[in-house]
Amino acid sequence: MAGDSVISPQRSKDFGKHEHGCDHYKRRCKILAPCCNKIFPCRHCHNETSNSLSNPKDHHDLVRQDVKQVICSICNTQQEVTQVCSHCGVNMGEYFCDICKFYDDDITKGQFHCNDCGICRVGGRDKFFHCEKCGSCYTVDLRDNHFCVENSMKSYCPICFEYLFDSVKSTRIMKCGHTMHMECFSQMTMQNHYRCPICCKAVLDMSAFWEDLDMDVSILCNDCNSTSTVQFHVLGLKCRQCNSYNTRRITAPANH
């Protein structure tokens, strides 16, 4: 194993906690990626780097379970995957999963490993359940309260095309059962798009909007100057006197 040229003293397990890591995780180790034999702070850093290479043939993702070697950020010792550094004795991650080869010093995230998903999740084990049909963990308020779509999370966000199953971003389950990132969902609805990009079903309760469209409105005809009451139509409002569509609405629905 590679390490400092002099023997480092044994340190407390909390030494250097929250002082090392990257934008994705606070941790006291780096990983040696077996796919390209390069050192990265975490698998996300690896994936961002490898997938930004100029040659598309070089693009690849790191399989987290394949990591065999890590490098302690405190004493620079390379060693097999383990929680406590074999050389200086620090916890290389306050949270550690030997299956996912995952380290994180910020345990306020409530990390837990889901055996059915096969990966670590965040948010607290008691706040999530695993839906067998959807193939993923959901918050307990969705138990028996969502429309199941087989392996719905093992797909790509229909907006940004990032793989949802192991994404670090929060997700939204729509009424139809399809999923997308919460941030992408918010951006979509802010732009007045309310249909699922996959199946075109409404993603929100649109009943109030449909009621507005069913209401009669008063219009003024720009051609004959008469007023009339007609049923709202998204394409145009027809004057009852001269049949012109050159009109404008002069009253809004009563519930506006």
Image (cartoon, grey):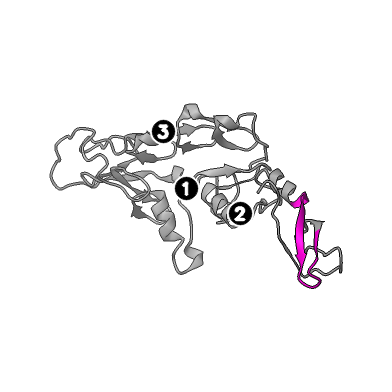
Name the residue tied to disc 2.
158
Query: Closer to the observer: label 1 or label 3?
Result: 3
Name the residue tied to disc 1.
63
Q: Residues within 10 Å of mark 1 (few under 14, many from 20)?
A: some
Residue 235 seen in the figure? no
Which residue lies at the image location 45% right of the left edge and 31% below the top edge? 124
At mark 1, the secondary structure is: loop
Q: Which amino acid type corresponds to the residue marked 2 in the rendered image?
A: Pro
Q: Is residue 131 above or below residue 166?
A: above
The N terminus lies in which quarter of the figure? top left
The answer to whether the residue labelled 2 contacts the one labelled 1, judged by CB atoms less than 8 Å apart, is no
Which residue lies at the image location 86% right of the left edge and 68% below the top edge? 243
Residue 80 seen in the figure? yes
Q: Which amino acid type corresponds to the residue marked 1 in the rendered image?
A: Val
State the image coordinates of residue 41 (x, y, percent, origin top left). Answer: 34, 50
Q: Residue furthest top?
A: 126
- Can residue 114 be found in the magenta stretch? no
What range is drawn magenta here? 213-228
Q: Quadrant of residue 134?
A: top right
Which residue lies at the image location 76% right of the left edge and 64% below the top edge? 220
User: Gap in Å between the C-alphas at discs 2 and 1?
Assistant: 23 Å
Question: Position of 6 compared to 179: left or right?
Answer: left
Q: Quadrant of residue 238?
A: bottom right
Q: Earlier in the sequence, mark 2 or mark 1?
A: 1
Q: Which amino acid type corresponds to the residue marked 3 in the rendered image?
A: Gly
Q: Earlier in the sequence, mark 1 or mark 3?
A: 1
Please name whichever residue, 66 or 124, is drawn nearer the observer in this view of the structure.
124
Please name whichever residue, 35 or 62, is drawn nearer the observer in this view of the structure.
62
Name the residue tied to disc 3.
110
Q: Residues within 10 Å of mark 2 (few under 14, many from 20)?
A: some
Which residue lies at the image location 50% right of the left edge and 33% below the top edge? 114
